[in-house]
Amino acid sequence: MAGEMKMRAALSGDVAEVKVLMSHPMESGLRKDAKTDKLVPALFINQVVATLNGKTVVDAQWGAAISKNPFLGFKVKGVKAGDKVAVEAVDNSGVKFNGEVAVA
Amino acid sequence: MDQLRRTFLKSAGVAGSVVFAISAGLLKSGEVLAAAWNTNAFTAKTIADAMAASGFKDSVESKDIEIKAPEIAENGQVVPVEVASKIPGTTSIAIFVEKNPTPMVGSFELMAGAEPYISTRIKMGQTSLVRVAVKAGGKTYSATKEVKVTIGGCGG
């Protein structure tokens, strides 16, 4: 189901390595549906914002060349256990997906 | 100066996009896009145009940008790419695939403690250079790595 987000944030010293896996077809609009022989319309996450305790740390713009079921890994310094990392993704149809994890 | 140039590039490239987004029902009034999607950069058909439109024109080759990607990708639909910049003051990382129909893959603004590191998985249509560009200290730098692709990832 599109929109699911799995997140993990592991602490090493004061640096958290965050891994996010999202469910999304990331259709480029260039692929033909094998059954209908028609192009599948473009539908892809084009904006991802990650925050640490509410403060933006990563502000990403994506194109359709990010793989289906997108993976994003990033690192943040100055983090302690219990800090909240949240990710909000928006796709080109305006649908939003959210995820949140406490740093372990 | 760089901020003025970036603002100019953004507004010149995506003039009206916020208005369009509101009228298309994509934006509820009161919401603000974190940063307007750079249509010009993402629809550019050459890597030079994509880099110029995203603020990476004239970037200097740098050995301090590490690109970890497979020598040979078995599946062009899912190519893992890990990028790390050792250049001090890195504030932005962007990934391009030279031979993709639209070379720009994504850009990542980093702030408030985010380290200059990004890991993701990208689609590559064919064997190509992956180019990573970085903004640091008001300048831009880039590096490349060739990834061979055995099965392409852009279309059916």
Image: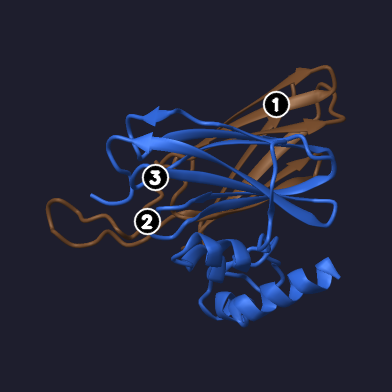
Chain colours: A brown, B blue
The Cα–Cα distance between marks 1 and 3, rounded to whole angstroms, is 26 Å
Residue B109 visible within the image: no
Dots 3, 2 in contact, CB < 8 A = no
- x, y percent for residue B150: 29, 35
Q: Position of residue B21 (x, y in %)?
A: 57, 74
Q: Chain of mark 3?
A: B
Q: Residue A56 vs residue B50: left or right?
A: right
Q: Secondary structure at mark 1?
A: strand
What residue type is disc 2 on? Answer: Ser
Residue sitting at x 30%, y 59%: A30
Task: Please tell me which residue is depicted at 43% across the width and 36% down the height of the picture.
Answer: B147
Which dot marks residue B124? Answer: 3
Residue at image mark 2: A28
In 3D space, how far apart are the residues under numbered discs 3 and 2 (Cα atoms)? 12 Å
Q: CA distance from mark 1 to mark 2?
A: 29 Å
- Left or right: residue A29 versus residue B23 is left
Query: Does label 3 lie on the same chain as label 1?
Result: no
Q: Which residue is mark 1?
A: A17
The reply to whether residue A51 is in sight is yes
- Image: B137 above or below A10: below
Q: Dividing the image into 4 quarters, which one contains the N terminus of chain B?
A: bottom right
Whether residue B43 is situated above or below residue A61 in the rendered picture = below
Q: Chain of mark 1?
A: A
Amino acid at circle 3: Met
Q: Amino acid at mark 1?
A: Glu
Graded by Cα atoms within 10 Å as few (under 14), some (14 to 19) or many (20 or more), the crowding at tag 2 reads: many
Classify residue A36 by image quadrant.
bottom left
